[in-house]
Image (spheres, grey):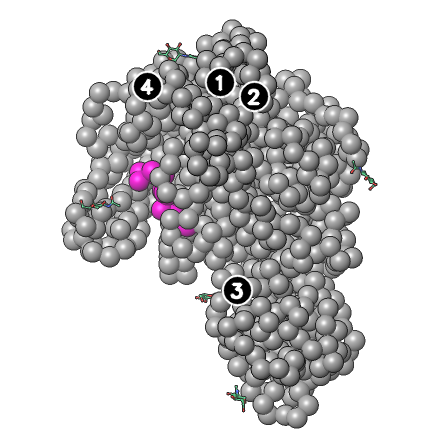
């Protein structure tokens, strides 16, 4: 039931594209008519577990609830998969009818089918103005534990060596095996677990927290890895690889499997374990929860993050790789910090020299050094078989160098020019060319079909990708000579202007709430060098003999751990700050990005590029607790019945929330206007800031005006006389004229004191 794309042994060229593109089908969902109902895995969710005296009493309650529906205690026990601990939920196998019946039981908030989710450096930290020698609060940083929920880890990597590390902090309850083929934890990697509740055997993975994919090793080292000098991928990106908080401890929770991806049941179990063990920050680079309005409580990541937040743990998640279209951002619950991917000033390009001496520049990672000579150059079209091309038979089209379309006799020893195509994800041209005996591949993107033209893919054989205008130069050259020739050089890092939001990075607005601006922030996510399992090929192509302890990957998966690392860094200075305070500090201190360069503006980059050094000292924070989120859920239309058991203490929705009332004290402000009925044209945002800076601080408001909008702030000046003092203000916006087309109008309110700048974007969206 899995398409070929989902198998890692397919000749898949682009490591990052693989990470980006895998779309996992739902497993275990019922097919066919209702009379022949199949059992499937489901999660039954009931909110907070704090009213239970013990885990056993909760398990008993779960079995009782299930047996009421499936008929007997015996059947219930057989259908049972797992009871969670830090929230009231369980996983079990039953039929859709039984799911409906359970859903209508008292106290059940949601019942949702277990689905399978997708996985969504060195210089990147310097690029962010966060050099190796930044001030650190090592006393606390050493006891910070970052939990990473991912594909597992490579414990032998130098990035996770414990040289110079003290023992785990006394509160730590995590465990670590022993596991198969896992050398074990140490004083850096202090916890590792895996979760595979569906019991299926994954032929390409093993029941151990060892990383058989590479993704989890990479993200873990970006957030917390040691400083490792001379890290590189075949010389590329050579430098010191390091995480944001190299002295922190790390715990891996493996939920994503090489060919089975990441299931909801396992994801919830990982959150449960991370809460139990005592992590401070959770970094989670996966998603695929679908678009469209849907319940936060049918979303395992949102549920897990909610209960983590209750325990004071901040969850940082990847915003997804479905850009650049609007409405694609994932993991958009307001209690999650949602990260977009930006490009840094380093790009990996290869020079192509033509027989006439012209030099062109292509994108992509080519680790091969050619013999210093020119090779004969041929187009895919000229290298096809003599038979007439059936242009509707795409799979055999030699112009795009499809599988079995090239004549070995014509290709042998030559560089082949292939047009880009949408099929290249599955049938990478360079693999076809090298299999046919070619020595190099130049992909030309004449039609602009490559969506991801700002990110370097790793090629299996010598290759690079040229844009349309460079492609024209090469076609002209081929036409101008009898014996065209070219050489593709090994990739070099070049400097480009940055930051910009990566084309693949998912864009807002959020499909969840109309009130919350998402994504929250941008961080480097293109061409990131970080640790990698040296036992795996650097591409997922099975015939690829290349191994490296560091690899270059792209995705919001790579951006997320940058921000999780910054959250840990902030936490090391302010151990008592709430998740919302830490998030506010990171958001309001971000470096603004350009709306000219990124036309989706805040929907592409949130508040801007993360700025780790400023985040530690934000001046003011927009703080919130659990109650704010619960009031928010009421506002979103959840009923008292649904939310009453969410927190440990009973909460009812107010009968009528005051008009214009803001349940969330969110650090950004967002108004969405329905262009059809032109409403609402007015919004009043009420916010409260807490003074985290010096006790006597005066802040003045500056407004960056929005086009066509009247905007006022009251009061215009905030005078603090104490630390932790709270002062409220309102921002009123009124749109003068509503257009009838999609429009993003950006502005901001900035509070400035002699030492601090606290910036909140204000975004109006008409749809
Ligand atoms: C453990 O690793 C060894 C050596 O790489 C391998 O031969 C063995 O199959 C692995 N064990 C499992 C359970 O995969
Ligand atoms: C990487 O840089 C280090 C110095 O920082 C140097 O000693 C080493 O040779 C370089 N490695 C490669 C492969 O360029
Ligand atoms: C990538 O493609 C988009 C859309 O075709 C284009 O606007 C953008 O300029 C391209 N970027 C680069 C770096 O070529
Ligand atoms: C194509 O690539 C070349 C080389 O990087 C660059 O100079 C040129 O601006 C690009 N053209 C377009 C249309 O993006
Ligand atoms: C190259 O020559 C072919 C055939 O003569 C022609 O169709 C094509 O337009 C030419 N391309 C360029 C870029 O001149
Ligand atoms: C949930 O709330 C209802 C209504 O107040 C209460 O009867 C029930 O005991 C609660 N359940 C749990 C598990 O807290
Ligand atoms: C916008 O308003 C129109 C008319 O009131 C309504 O039919 C439509 O569903 C609304 N669209 C959204 C996105 O709410």
Residue 473 is one of the magenta-drawn residues: no
Q: Is residue 745 left or right of residue 367?
A: left
Q: Position of residue 275 (x, y in %)?
A: 56, 23
Task: Estimate how packed mark 2 is, as few (under 14), some (14 to 19) or many (20 or more) residues with alpha carbons within 10 Å.
Answer: many
Q: Are marks 4 and 2 in contact (CB under 8 Å)?
A: no
Nearer the observer, disc 4 or disc 1?
Answer: 1
Asked if one can make out residue 328 in the rendered structure from this viewpoint, the answer is: yes
- How far apart are the two marked residues, 2 and 3, measured between alpha carbons? 43 Å
Rendered residue at 78%/32% (across/down): 180
Over which residues does the magenta segment extend?
507-517
Q: Ligand 6: does it lie within 8 Å of the C-beta at label 4?
A: yes
- How far apart are the two marked residues, 4 and 2, measured between alpha carbons? 27 Å
Mark 2 or mark 3: name the one nearer the start of the chain.
Answer: 2
Mark 4 or mark 2: name the one nearer the start of the chain.
Answer: 2
- How far apart are the two marked residues, 1 and 3, measured between alpha carbons? 47 Å
- How far apart are the two marked residues, 3 and 4, measured between alpha carbons? 48 Å
Q: Is residue 724 left or right of residue 423?
A: left
Q: In the picture shown, does residue 238 fall above or below 433?
A: above
Q: In the picture shown, does residue 758 fall above or below 395?
A: above
Q: Position of residue 99 (x, y in %)?
A: 44, 25
Number of the label disc, if any, that sits on residue 641: 4
Rendered residue at 58%/64% (across/down): 424
Foreground pick, 212 / 526 = 212
Task: Estimate how packed mark 3 is, as few (under 14), some (14 to 19) or many (20 or more) residues with alpha carbons within 10 Å.
Answer: few
Number of the label disc, if any, that sits on residue 70: 1
**Helix, strand, or loop for circle 4?**
helix
Number of the label disc, if any, that sits on residue 79: 2
Q: Are marks 1 and 2 in contact (CB under 8 Å)?
A: yes
């Amino acid at each position: 039931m899995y398409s070929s794309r989902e198998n890692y042994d397919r000749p898949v060229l682009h490591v990052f594209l693989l990470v980006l593109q895998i779309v996992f089908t739902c497993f275990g969902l019922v097919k066919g008519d209702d009379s022949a109902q199949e059992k499937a895995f489901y999660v039954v969710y009931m909110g907070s577990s704090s009213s239970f005296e013990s885990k056993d009493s909760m398990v008993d309650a779960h079995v009782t609830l299930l047996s009421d529906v499936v008929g007997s205690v015996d059947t219930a026990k057989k259908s049972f998969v797992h009871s969670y601990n830090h929230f009231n939920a369980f996983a079990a196998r039953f039929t859709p009818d039984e799911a409906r019946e359970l859903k209508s039981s008292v106290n059940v908030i949601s019942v949702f089918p277990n689905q399978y989710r997708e996985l969504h450096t060195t210089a990147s930290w310097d690029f962010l103005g966060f050099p190796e020698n930044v001030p650190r609060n090592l006393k606390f940083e050493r006891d910070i534990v970052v939990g990473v929920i991912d594909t597992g880890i490579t414990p032998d990597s130098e990035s996770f060596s414990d040289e110079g590390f003290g023992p785990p902090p006394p509160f730590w309850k995590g465990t670590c095996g022993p596991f198969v083929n896992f050398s074990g934890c140490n004083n850096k990697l202090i916890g590792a677990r895996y979760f595979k509740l569906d019991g299926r055997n994954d032929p390409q993975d093993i029941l151990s927290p060892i990383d058989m994919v590479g993704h989890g090793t990479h993200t873990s080292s970006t957030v917390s890895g040691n400083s490792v000098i001379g890290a590189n991928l075949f010389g590329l990106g050579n430098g010191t690889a390091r995480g944001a908080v190299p002295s922190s401890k790390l715990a891996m929770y493996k939920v994503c499997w090489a060919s089975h991806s990441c299931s909801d049941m396992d994801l919830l179990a990982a959150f449960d374990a991370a809460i139990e063990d005592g992590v401070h920050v959770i970094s989670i680079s996966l998603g695929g929860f679908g678009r469209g309005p849907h319940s936060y409580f049918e979303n395992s990541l949102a549920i897990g993050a909610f209960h983590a937040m209750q325990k004071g743990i901040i969850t940082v998640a990847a915003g997804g790789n479905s850009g650049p279209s609007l409405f694609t951002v994932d993991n958009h619950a307001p209690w999650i910090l949602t990260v977009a991917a930006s490009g840094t000033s380093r790009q990996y390009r290869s020079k192509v020299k033509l027989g006439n001496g012209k030099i062109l520049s292509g994108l992509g990672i080519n680790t091969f050094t050619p013999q210093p000579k020119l090779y004969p150059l041929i187009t895919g079209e000229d290298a096809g078989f003599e038979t007439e091309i059936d242009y509707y038979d795409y799979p055999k089209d030699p112009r795009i160098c499809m599988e079995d379309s090239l004549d070995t006799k014509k290709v042998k020893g030559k560089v082949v020019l292939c047009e880009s195509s949408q099929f290249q994800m599955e049938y990478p041209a360079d693999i076809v060319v090298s299999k046919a005996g070619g020595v190099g591949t130049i992909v030309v993107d004449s039609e602009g079909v490559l969506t991801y033209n700002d990110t370097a893919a790793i090629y299996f054989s010598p290759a690079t990708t040229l844009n349309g205008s460079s492609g024209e130069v090469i076609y002209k050259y081929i036409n101008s000579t009898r014996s065209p020739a070219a050489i593709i050089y090994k990739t070099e890092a070049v400097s480009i202007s940055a930051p910009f939001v990566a084309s693949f990075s998912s864009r807002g607005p959020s499909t969840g709430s109309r009130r919350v601006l998402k994504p929250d922030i941008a961080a480097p996510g293109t061409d990131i060098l970080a640790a990698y399992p040296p036992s795996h090929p650097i591409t997922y192509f099975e015939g690829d003999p290349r191994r490296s302890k560091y690899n270059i990957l792209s995705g919001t998966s790579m951006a997320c751990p940058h921000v999780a690392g910054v959250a840990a860094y902030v936490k090391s200075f302010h151990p008592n700050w709430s998740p919302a305070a830490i998030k506010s500090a990171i958001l309001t201190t971000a470096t603004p990005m350009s709306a000219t360069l990124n036309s989706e503006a805040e929907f592409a980059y949130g508040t801007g590029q993360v700025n780790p050094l400023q985040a530690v000292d934000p001046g003011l924070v927009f703080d919130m607790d659990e109650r704010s989120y619960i009031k928010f859920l009421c506002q979103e239309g959840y009923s008292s019945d649904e939310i009453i058991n969410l927190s440990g203490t009973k909460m009812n929705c107010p009968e009528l929330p005051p008009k214009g009332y803001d349940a969330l004290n969110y650090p950004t402000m967002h108004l969405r206007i329905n262009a059809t009925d032109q409403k609402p044209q007015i919004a009043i945002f009420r916010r409260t800031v807490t003074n985290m800076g010096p006790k006597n601080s005066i802040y003045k408001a500056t407004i960056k005006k929005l086009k066509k909008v009247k905007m006022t702030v009251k009061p215009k000046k905030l005078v603090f006389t104490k630390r932790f003092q709270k002062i409220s203000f309102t921002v009123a916006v009124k749109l003068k004229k509503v257009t009838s087309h999609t429009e993003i109008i950006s502005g901001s309110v900035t509070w400035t004191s002699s030492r601090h700048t606290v910036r909140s974007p204000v975004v109006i969206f008409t749809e």
